[in-house]
Amino acid sequence: MRPSLRSSRSFSLSPLPSVLSSRPLRSLVILALLLAACSAALIAQSPVAPRLQTGFDAIRENDLRSNLTFIAGDGLEGRMSLQPGDDASAEWVASEFAKAGLQPAATDASGKPSFLQAVPLIEYKPDPSATTLSLSHKDGAQQQWHAPIVSCAFRNKVEVSGGLVYVGYGITAPELNYDDYANVDVRGKIVLLMEHEPQEDDPKSIFNGTGNTRYATSRVKLLNAQRHGAIAVLLMPEPNATHVPTSKRLANVLAGITAKRLTPIPLQAIANDEINIALTTIQPAVADELLQNSGATAKELQSSIDRDLKSHSREIAGVQLHLQAKNSATRAANTYNVAGLLPGSDPALAAETLIVSGHHDHNGTSEVEEQNGLHHVDIWHGADDNGSGTVGVVELAHAFVANPAKPKRSILFVVFASEERGLLGSYYMAQHPLRPLATTRAMVNFDMIGRDEKPSIQTDRVIEIPADTTNRLNLVGTLYSPDFLHTVQHEDEHIGLTLDDRFERDTALGIFFRSDQFPFILHDVPALWFFTGFHPDYHHVSDTVDKIDFTKMTKIVRLSYLTLFAIADEKQTPKFVANPALGK
């Protein structure tokens, strides 16, 4: 593991030498040592500028504790998206924004100012028995696969037919001179592609070494396939992968959610999302069959791409595919992003925006059947995920308004909807921004900022966790804006947290695109996710308020306050680095 970006300073009292045995002398020495220690502590954490002190001091543990006790309490029933408990959490955030004195940043259906931005969703339940992938050969031979060997979840019914084209990783990256779609025509065809990115075990890879770039996520690959004219995407695991497959990682995450649920969590999608083709996940055995006439095995094709970073894409001649899938139930409904604006104090800079965000939803309740046949209801409280981020944004709103000096640039305070169902609220706002993204200069996202990182089933044998995480804050997204990182590091001199960037070199966990800052990074907005890491209570009913470290959480919120104020007032805002490997 590479060392952390910054280590907090500490001190301790050494045992007194025996010569200092007289009580008066010993007392004087102890007093002197204590004074020296206090001086060292003051040096380690430089004082906050007086013009920022009022707002800084307004960020208090007691506020965070009382608000989180409500948000993660039984009354909100786990805040499942499109259910009453989560609607209540959004209304509470809106009322706190109004109480703080923010301006409504959205409009309601009648065009009046509102703190609530409606996010139209489709909630659906896939029918696995209706999922079929059929392969027809030129000679008349046919093969057919069903769930769970093939898995398709889409908001609409799927029924498409077309030829098959293998497109490697499915990536088009002009700035890297890399294109899996070079020399193939996929219009009207179904494409087969791999997870992740080339050379992911090579620290010198142009795809962010052993970390992820924006091209790694399946959403970006879907959009790319759609732009090239494909009618559907088949996604297979990397045949040469050295890490835990995505399907296994997701299974580890879902194990805690679904273990005892009598009713599965419904899937959700943005009603009019920009993606309009379906993704179907297939097992390696299916991929091998589909590639039989390709002239190379799946392993050989991946090795060739990783070796020379050239396109080895090809149409699979003489085959025709038919894909169908449908849902057993669907419904349309609105959830809500909550957004309030603090206008900038400088007329020349007020049109520019900084965003601070979290998400208010979690995993609701689950009916559980006991051994005696009786039922009870479990509540998925989501205190850390992401009650902590929700109340952190609210606390910042109050702090910025309370401070007499106001930031020069405007700050948009947002608590997103339906993050747990696929970052739906943040993807929607990125598609329907309340302030222009071209003049959005930075974003701080809170998601799980209240705990210490501990080993769990998800991280076991995947990423190294430091022995002591009691003062540690993970920063995700720093490679796309080193300037932003430097500002956080500088402001941390007032706070003394241990800043850690090791998730920037993660491939297996896919951390980079698992929270609400990612949709904005896709639009070239410098954005950092403040994250205290996974723990055994992640996505379990045991993620409760009594386990939150409010002292640490207060430090994180205060660090974000200073960071946002610094960026809001400085002449040069953080630059976005589109290609971290090339530094430009």
Image (cartoon, rainbow, N blue to C red):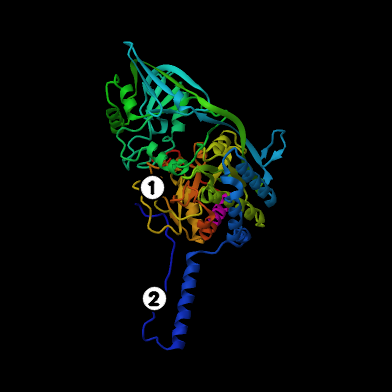
* Residue 196 appears anywhere in the view: yes
Q: Which residues are magenta?
A: 557-570
Q: Amino acid at mark 2?
A: Ser
The residue at 46%/59% (across/down) is: 471
Tag 2 residue: 14
The residue at 53%/59% (across/down) is: 550
Q: Give the secondary structure at mark 1.
A: loop
* Closer to us: 438 or 41: 41
Residue 398, above or below 224 = below
Question: In this view, which residue lies farthest toward the top?
Answer: 139
* Closer to us: 305 or 281: 281
The residue at 47%/58% (across/down) is: 497
Query: Residue 245: horizontal and vertical position, in percent?
Result: 36, 37
The answer to whether residue 284 is magenta is: no
Q: Main secondary structure of the magenta part?
A: helix
Q: First in sequence: mark 1 or mark 2? A: 2
